[in-house]
Image (cartoon, rainbow, N blue to C red):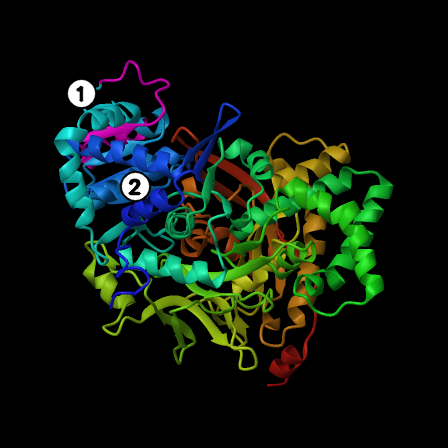
Amino acid sequence: MQNPQAAEAGLQSIPALLARNADRFGNMPAYREKEFGIWQSWTWFDAARQIRDLALGFLVLGLRPGDHIAIIGRNRPAHYWSMVAAQMCGAVPVPLYQDAVADEMAYVLENCGARFVVCGDQEQVDKVLEVGERAPGVEHIIYTDKRGMRKYDHTRMNALAHVQAEGRAAEPRLGAELDALTAGLGYDDTCVMLYTSGTTGKPKGVVLSNRNIIETARNTAGFDKLQQREEVLAYLPMAWVGDFIFSVGQAYWAGFTVNCPEGAQTMMTDLREIGPTYFFAPPRVFEGQLTNVMIRMEDAGAIKRWLFRHYMDLARRIGPQILEGKPVGLLNRMRYAVGDLLIYGPLKNTLGYSRIRVGYTAGEAIGPEIFDFYRSLGINLKQLYGQTEASVFITQQPDGQVRSDTVGVPSPGVEVRIAENGEVFYRSPGTFVEYFRNPDSTASTKDAQGWVATGDAGFFEEATGHLRIIDRAKDVGKMADGRMFAPKYVENKLKFYPNILEAVVFGAGRDFCTAFINIDLTAVGNWAERNNIAYASYQELAGHPQVYETIREHVEAVNESVAADPMLSGCQISRFLVLHKELDPDDGEMTRTRKVRRNIIAEKYADLIAALYDGRDSVSTRTEVTYEDGRKGEIRATLRLEDARVIPTQAMHRVAAE
């Protein structure tokens, strides 16, 4: 069934939206990119011309309808143009994670059968060349950045600018063919293919149609009243569905501006310069920024520290109420205004959040304390719940109904139901078409009626109709005494503390819970510097007695918080250790989107888990690690195992009595 506002208006593809925007917003900025410290800008008319030249260049090289074209690199206008140009030719863009190692890249290139690869720079070209025979379908490599490429064999390699130049020259010859291909794009044709993060196995290619992307973009843009004047910062991996829906789907539907930073190192500076009005970040970004704020305040003078703590206490009490337009006394409003002048305003400006009208976080559950911190500053940060297979959106929080412990109500056009075992199911216009070349996984995930199993456990609150996600369904279990075990709930509370970068909690089927802790090297290193504590490595700092004592205090504070929740009070941590290395995607311990791979960690560190449960005070271990250049190595360590105070609860007394 075609939507009257999109399909019947002829807007059945991203290239059709591009043509509309070039006509309607022709002189308004579509893209900006910072290069060599200078912001460059392209209007919608400019972007349409650049994309057309590139599409014609692809045709010159022999791109055919149905081909797959991989895009590997950082967020750049040229890479977004490559995706839309591929669509104009009837081909399927497949963005990859730019930090993927060659083996990961080889799997995706071979699985999708990519004939063309657009690479951002020399590093990405080298990885594609290293893949070699493992991706036999690759015929053409196109690179954006020419630096370092002069002496390469260009037999099957071209600079993107040269491809565009060839396309411009071919306009008289191929222009009509391109117009016909673009006009022939249908609502149910493939728009993009995005690979899952592969938390539990090999990544799967999620096929999303024009209908999926455009309907989702239309519905969600209406939900938050997104308009052409919005500014977004495109800095998240292009292979992630969130970047595609925000920087392509919604951007092309609403016609707003996509800003690309110069690089990861300059992202925070570029964020402040742009001052986005519409912003998305996973919890790790907000956690990292809060850590930096806390570090800076520790280094500040006594008066500044007192002012910060005083006004932040006030903000936590009344900031969210003011943000939501709820009644607040005149005196408190005046005090908050002073706090905004002295603390909140400068802090938001430093973070780059002064102009945010709508902000979202998703991907992982965010700690309530972190979430409330940002809302207390007057930042309209909300939560959404989604996944690649849904074209992102399953639920969203409406303005005025924002809470840290829910993920909102079903997004427009989305139906959600809870199965008897607590698993969340949905169906919507954004529901994916299929997993590429994987009918068995498609059938096990999406039934004949279009209902998709999320793999998450949750429930709807009767009073508000908001969805609460407990954890991954496969991770939610029972303690040995029958109490509920939900590790992510506890891990997010731990990660509120700036000293803790990552945490992994164990306890399913056990008598008590234990945890691995990763310290945040920036935060703890800053503390060590202030206290004149010398250290030579992450491992040495992680094992320092004072670091352990600080982590114990954090764990026990979290235990007090967890004990207050009758349903999850059994998840208090009885013993913990501080890992001797950071969990790393290159070591297979996390996905590229930094989701913990629990099964791999449990297998890899089985000796450490066993030691936590058998009462030992220390354990010696050897761990294989992967260096940046791909070489393997081994580190050895002797780790301390520490007890933490657990708060007795009524549930514990009841279990003991039984």
SS type, badge 2: helix
Percent x, y of residue 114: 21, 40
Q: Earlier in the sequence, mark 2 or mark 1?
A: 2
Percent x, y of residue 447: 26, 71
Q: Would you place residue 216 above or below residue 247 in this image? A: below
What residue is shown at x 12% (from left), y 30% (from top)?
173
Q: Does residue 389 belong to the magenta stretch?
A: no
CA separation in Å, label 2 and label 1 = 23 Å
What residue is shown at x 33% (from left), y 56% (from top)?
213
Question: In the figure, residue 612 lies in which quadrant?
Answer: bottom right
| Tally of numbered tags | 2
Going by the numbered disc 2, the residue's amino acid type is Met
Percent x, y of residue 232: 49, 45
SS type, badge 1: loop
Q: Which mark is residue 155?
A: 1
Task: Judge by depth and name the residue closer to the eye, 35 or 147.
Answer: 35
Start and end of the magenta stretch? 126-153
The quadrant of the rendering that contains the C terminus is bottom right
Name the front one of labels 2 and 1: 2
Q: Would you place residue 587 above or below residue 423 in this image? A: above
Q: Which mark is residue 254?
A: none
Q: Would you place residue 544 above or below residue 141 in this image? A: below
Neighbour tally class for label 1: few under 14, some 14-19, many 20 plus, Cα within 10 Å: few
User: What residue did someone put label 2 on?
Assistant: 83
The quadrant of the rendering that contains the N terminus is bottom left
